[in-house]
Amino acid sequence: MRPTGWRGALGEAYTEWTRRDGNAHLGVEAVYASLDPHQIIRDGQEALRQNAQNVVNRGRRTVTHQGVKAVQWEFSWTAGEAGDAPWVRPGTRYHEVRRALAIGDTAYVLSWTVTEEQWQRNRPLMRQVINSFTVGG
């Protein structure tokens, strides 16, 4: 499931949707390796700390995603000047949830990012969208 009215883009092993006002983003990345979801989240933390400012860890936990163990990391961050994604606005504070899960020889990273001031209002939609993720046949 994806949010209605968001613009989508498809890349190699990555699909993303951005809300029309640019204040929210959904990403789904396929990682074709037998990586542990914990390691995927740790690697993501390292990469984020290199590009973002004021990263605040709001918790990391193991969750069950449609019968599969997954790792979920919630955090907030401020975009730096050299943003690596076109939807990121330098100086903007974001709140994000990333969930990593492995199915077979593929791991998936789901990310939901919203500006900090819109986080609370968008939490129910975030839960609905992330929890609806399934792997196509």
Image (spheres, rainbow, N blue to C red):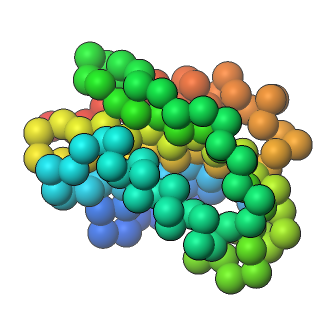
The residue at the far bottom in this view is: 82
Residue 130, above or below 85? above
Give percent across and percent down for residue 115.
79, 50
Please name whichever residue, 39 or 131, is drawn nearer the observer in this view of the structure. 39
How many labels sit on residues?
A: 0
User: In the displayed structure, does residue 115 sit left or right of residue 39?
Assistant: right
Q: Please state, as top left, top right, bottom left or bottom right, where the C terminus lies in the image.
A: top left
Q: Does 47 sit above or below residue 29?
A: below
Q: Is residue 47 above or below residue 126?
A: below
Q: Residue at x 31, y 42 (%)?
A: 37
Pick the front one: 98 or 11: 98
Q: Position of residue 17 (x, y in %)?
A: 55, 54
| In the displayed structure image, the side of residue 78 where residue 109 appears, left or right | left
Residue placed most toward the observer, 19 or 98: 98
> Can residue 2 be seen at all in this image of the molecule?
no
| Residue found at x 37% / y 68% | 11
Percent across and percent down for residue 106 are: 18, 48
Residue under the image location 51 percent in, 43 percent down: 98
From this viewpoint, is residue 47 visible?
Answer: yes
Q: Which quadrant would residue 58 be assigned to in this image? A: top right
Quadrant of res 121: top right
Q: Where does the image place residue 119, in percent across and percent down from the top left?
A: 78, 37
Q: Residue at x 68, y 82 (%)?
A: 82
Which image quadrant for residue 4? top right
- Determine whether, in the image, residue 67 is placed left or right of residue 17: left
- Residue 16 higher or lower than 118, as above or below: below
